[in-house]
Image (cartoon, rainbow, N blue to C red):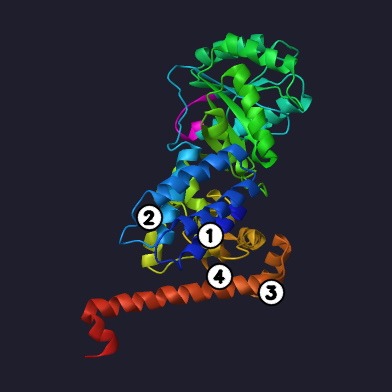
Amino acid sequence: MLETLSEKLQKVFRNLRGYGKLTESNVGDALNEVRKALLEADVNYKVAKEFVASARQKCLGKEVLASVTPGQQVVKVIHDELVRLMGENAAPLKLDKSPSKVLLVGLNGSGKTTTAGKLARHLQKQGRSPLLVACDVYRPAAIDQLKTLGEQIGIPVFTVPGEQDVTKIAAQAIDFAVANHHHIVVVDTAGRQQIDEPLMQELVRLKAGTNPQEILLVADAATGQQAVDIARQFNEKLDLTGIILTKLDGDARGGAALSMKAVTQRPIKFVGVGEKLEDFEPFHPDRIASRILGMGDIVTLVEKAQEAVDVEKAEKLAEKIKKRQLDLQDFLEQLQQIKKMGPLENLLGMLPGMNKVKDLSVDEGRFRRIEAIVQSMTPKERSRPEIINGSRRLRIAKGSGTQVSDINELLRQFQTMKKMMKNMGRFEKLMARGGPSALFGK
């Protein structure tokens, strides 16, 4: 997400480190580079100009604190300006009625139907009971796609076969939601390749018929400034309450994320950061600003861990580790919990300083191979890896689609880990007996 912008801004900050104090000259040079970086990231020209002007005034209008360097002072100003630009605070959904209605609008190809599933899943994890409503009656695959998503996450999808009037479909869906105690109605609407009057008029009628609490534009971040123009036009017709940006995990320069709030005066409420239904995050301007500036995002990382970790299993695992009884089944379960947190590259990117590591990548295929290998073992083999002889290794390799050498490598690594656990146990006993002197002598 915004990797290129992040790299360019940090280069500017590195160049400032050599200065003993901030002057109009070195601040001007630095902020000119910041402006170029913003424009190259596809940030709206007017937004970039105003951003730099505001940052310049704050950099030159402050005394440099004795405890920080000039470079750190500029980083602080740029961070605060980024947060201000993107909306300062997270903007939660306003769901003050039951059932609350949420309309998702946007052009074809923006990921609207998938986003409907992601949003429903997000609400479901909060303990709510959402209902998905298929109101895209023009694209045949849209209804089937929404049904498939609903089945994957266990959320009902309301459809009216053969009905073409979306206001009637929505009205019946709301009645169904009331009768079946669904707290929220998430409506997937039709899109077009481009904005046209028939599309807008249909959405205007749908808005009048449903009186929604939220009208969220789903916009593809990869379209850059076009996404901002689309948002402006939808907002003029529908008075949007917020925006969901999709595909922020791709190769997009990401300028839409920085421009959208300033141009439309509507908050970005969520972002899609991957293809899986779990790859969906509330938008926190301060956290995104920290990621851009290489400060990491520990808060989001911890939240993802809390969602993924099974507390009861974690306690059992801790007890097994303490007793040095870890087996391959435990290893598999931990691997699967890590996978729930999302792509590992995204997780590493949330650690402070990790964006400075060039070509940061994780071999996800290796993790899939390990998972396949362990799943191809019998329960007895998982609990007692030492019984896995040559013929068993050959069977496991065939069953997992891997090589015997892959099995050998995994078992070696597992044995190394068990030895480390054993040595830790010895260390704890020695420390308990005599403290450091028991290890190093008096």
Q: Which residue is mark 1?
A: 12
**CA–CA distance in space, label 3 to label 1:** 47 Å
**CA–CA distance in space, label 4 to label 2:** 23 Å
Q: What x and y, as percent, mark residue 260?
A: 57, 34
* Corner quadrant of residue 271: top right
Q: What x and y, as percent, mark residue 79?
A: 45, 49
Looking at the rendered structure, the kind of residue marked 3 is: Ser
- What range is drawn magenta here? 123-130
Q: Which residue is mark 3?
A: 405
Magenta stretch containing residue 128, yes or no? yes
> Which numbered disc, 3 or 1, marks the residue closer to the eye?
1
Looking at the rendered structure, the kind of residue marked 1 is: Val
Q: Which residue is mark 2?
A: 315
Magenta stretch containing residue 184, yes or no? no
Q: What x and y, as percent, mark residue 394?
A: 71, 70
Answer yes or no: is residue 114 visible.
Answer: no
Q: What x and y, as percent, mark residue 343?
A: 59, 52
